[in-house]
Image (spheres, helix red, strand yellow):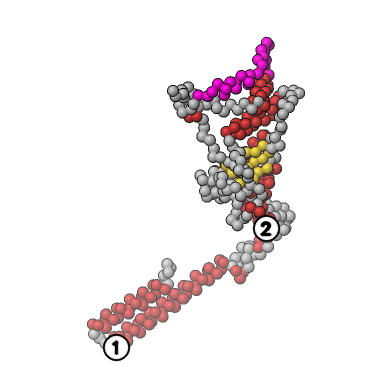
Amino acid sequence: MSKDVSSDGLWTRSLPPTERNYQNNNTLPKKIISSMITPEQAICYQVYYRIEEITNILNNNIIDYCHLPQRERSPSPPPIYDAKGRRTNSREQRFKKKLEDERHRLIDIALKMIPHYKAPLNYKKPNSFKDKYFIPVEQFPNVNFVGLLLGPRGNTLKQLQQTSGCKIAIRGKGSVKEGKTAADLPKGAMNLSEPLHCVIIADSEEKLAKGIKACESVVIKAVTSPEGQNDLKRGQLRELAELNGTLREDNRPCAICGLKGHKRFDCPQRENYANKIICEKCGQPGHVAQDCIILSKANQRNNNSSTLGNYNRSTINNYNNTITTIKQNNNNNNNRSEERRVGKECLRLCRSRWSPYH
């Protein structure tokens, strides 16, 4: 006769009684609160009770991860192995790590809210908190996130670390230049199986949150700023020019007055010699008589009119001489047409050369 497998879920078997009796070992002594308490005291009691509950689970090795049916569980991540071939992310290990992380956060809250609170005996405070911030490279493939986070010679990344108080490193696919080997890079930098991300390590969760927010601000500014209007990128280019010695300062002091904000040729204290020069012909300041514009324009008009008159007179004389020669040589009708043609040609040349629109 087959066993009944429908009680614990659609695709899972029912757990034996020995596996179901683990809750009997996880019972804490019940306490009755006889008086009214404030909301802050209620929070302190909940935190304290939850810390004791997690400590009891970890000390007695009561791993409560089988209470959900298999179809209701989240998909398991791919297995990860260490250098010795041992798996480091089994279901039991992941559940323990989740409980330990929760206990770390609750103990930090209890130390701040509960006076004279002491952590459990077997509790070891973590030396550092670690988290990852994944960069949206697939959504924005044309943005150089690595360059913006590093900055000129890594100065931007150093500033982010100083302001947040945590250590930030760029890891994942695209974080290593071509030609680099594992010997040239720190440990773990050659792990290119994961997407591009920032590894943030801090000694407290507050600093960890600041580090994530600092990296996120750089990424958001790079994504939302229009092309050529990213203040962070312009500042990095300016800093790089300063480091290379190719920066041309725009705020250098004026060579005449020593003040900033204007060029030498725009200095209000600069002596203007042009206003002291007065033209002898027109009487206007700013130029000498040799460069007088008014007089040169008047002379040009006179020369043009005299030249035009001389040219017209010479053209008419040539025209008359040509007509006389044609009449003396030939008296045919063909000569008359030739006479008209020569006259039109002379008149066209005269108009084309001395037209005001030419």
Q: Give the CA distance from mark 1 to mark 2.
A: 89 Å
- Tell me if residue 232 can be seen: no
Query: Which amino acid, mark 2?
Result: Asn
Could you tell me which residue is drawn at 25 percent across and 83 percent down?
A: 334
Please say whether residue 321 is visible from this viewpoint: yes
Residue nearest the viewer, comparing 37 with 131: 131
- Farthest left residue in view: 333
Q: In the current view of this chain or complex, which residue is farthest to the bottom?
A: 329
Q: Sort mark 1 into few (<14), some (14-19) or many (20+) by Cα contacts within 10 Å.
A: few
> Which label belongs to residue 228?
none
The residue lying toward the viewer, choosing from 21 and 210, is 21
Q: What element carries label 1?
A: helix
Q: Is residue 106 above or below residue 304?
A: above
N-terminal of the pair, mark 1 or mark 2, is 2
Taking the magenta stretch, the answer to whether it contains residue 64 is no
Mark 1 or 2, closer to the camera: 2
Residue reaching furthest to the right: 116
Q: Residue at x 30, y 78 (%)?
A: 341
The mark found on residue 328 in the picture is 1
Q: What residue type is labelled 1?
A: Gln
Question: Where does the image place residue 329, in percent across and percent down from the top left?
Answer: 28, 89
- Image-quadrant location for residue 222: top right
Give the magenta-colored segment's residue range. 14-41
The residue at the far top in this view is: 34
Q: In this view, does 115 lie above or below 302?
A: above
**Residue 76: percent from the left, percent from the top?**
53, 35
Q: Position of residue 70 (x, y in %)?
A: 50, 29
